[in-house]
Amino acid sequence: MISHGKDIKIFTGNANPQLAADICKIIGTKLGEVEVKSFADGEVSVSMYETVRGSDVFLVQSTCKPVNNNLMELLIMIDACRRASAGRITAVIPYFGYARQDRKAKSRDPISAKLVANMLVAAGADRVLTMDLHAAQIQGFFDIPVDNLFGNPVFVDYYAKKFGDRCEDMVVVSPDVGSVARARMFAQKLHMGLAIVDKRRQKANECEVMNVIGDVAGKECILFDDMVDTAGSLCNAAKAVVEVGGASKVYACASHGVLSGPAIDRLEASNIEELALLDTIPAHTEAARGRIKYLTVAPMFAEAIERTYQEISIAKLFN
């Protein structure tokens, strides 16, 4: 007998309802009835229209833009479920906002990722299920179990089908030194080569010089990163791979398409043939006019939720 909850209940806020609906469809259950809205003064209001007493509750909510609204929605939904005697509450956060504020970069900086972790625990979450944290050590900010899924398998499957035998002649490129470990794992699975874009400023007030470490001359390349925000780094790396490295074509992929500010215009003007993103964040309204393709993570999250409920290891999802 499963002691932590008699049945699965899945609810969602306003961040990514389509992903939650897709997860429910795969699991074979209906999305829970909840109304999440705002009062006239901007305060978040949550009304749950079905019982959660004794249930294993999963709250699907990315903390993407508007970040603070979506975070408050999640916290208040957790509190509502806790006060309604839910058996266990799992916060399913496909995109974990504030993850880039994971350390003190200078004096008197906050560590906002730790603060968010404290808030989720204080609200009453028993577990967290997320994907491709910007910094893996954020798992240690929590005093509850955190499962950090990898979007890697989704991209491996997509590019293996897209390029087939050509994969062995292609090169995975890390757009900066910080993403090398992530890119290396991806390259190994597809039997591709690996290269790194190294950017440095030789002197103060001089432009950054982009160097490409690795052989990409005449080859098709895939830039691999965890997120695309304003797309500045990604587009500059793509430019360097072609102009400095001599690559023939550049593709790109990232787990989280934040796509803030001038991102779409920069991608339109870049030499990136196609940008593949996961649907951890809803599709950008102008994505259709760019070269952006969205891949779904609903099957992976659906399996993780089912395995969590049944107390089965989810280790196979990391491979």
Image (cartoon, grey):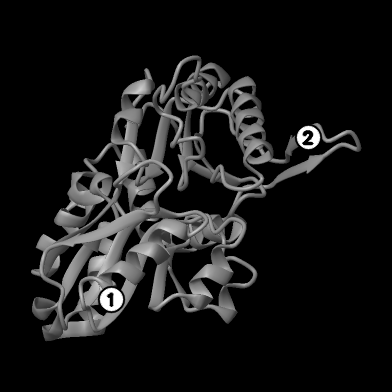
x, y percent for residue 69: 69, 38
Residue 142 lies in what quarter of the image? Answer: top left
Going by the numbered disc 2, the residue's amino acid type is Ser
x, y percent for residue 65: 62, 48
Going by the numbered disc 1, the residue's amino acid type is Val
Which residue sits at x=48%, y=61%? 279
Q: Nearer the viewer, residue 110 or 166?
A: 110
Q: Which mark is residue 95?
A: none
Which residue sits at x=52%, y=56%? 230
Q: Nearer the viewer, residue 21 or 225?
A: 225
As helix, strand or loop, the secondary structure at mark 2 comes to: strand
Q: Relative to 236, is 84 on the left or the right? A: right
Q: Is 79 situated above or below 172?
A: above
As helix, strand or loop, the secondary structure at mark 1 comes to: helix
Q: Relative to 186, is 137 on the left or the right? A: right
Which residue sits at x=46%, y=31%? 101
Q: Nearer the viewer, residue 275 or 82?
A: 275
Comparing labels 1 and 2, the label whose residue is closer to the camera: 1
The residue indicated by pointer 2 is 45
Q: Relative to 103, is 9 on the left or the right? A: right
Q: Quadrant of the N terminus?
A: top left
x, y percent for residue 9: 53, 43
The residue indicated by pointer 1 is 242
Q: Earlier in the sequence, mark 1 or mark 2?
A: 2
Mark 2 neighbour density, 10 Å: few (under 14) some (14–19) many (20 or more): some
**CA separation, marks 1 and 2?**
50 Å
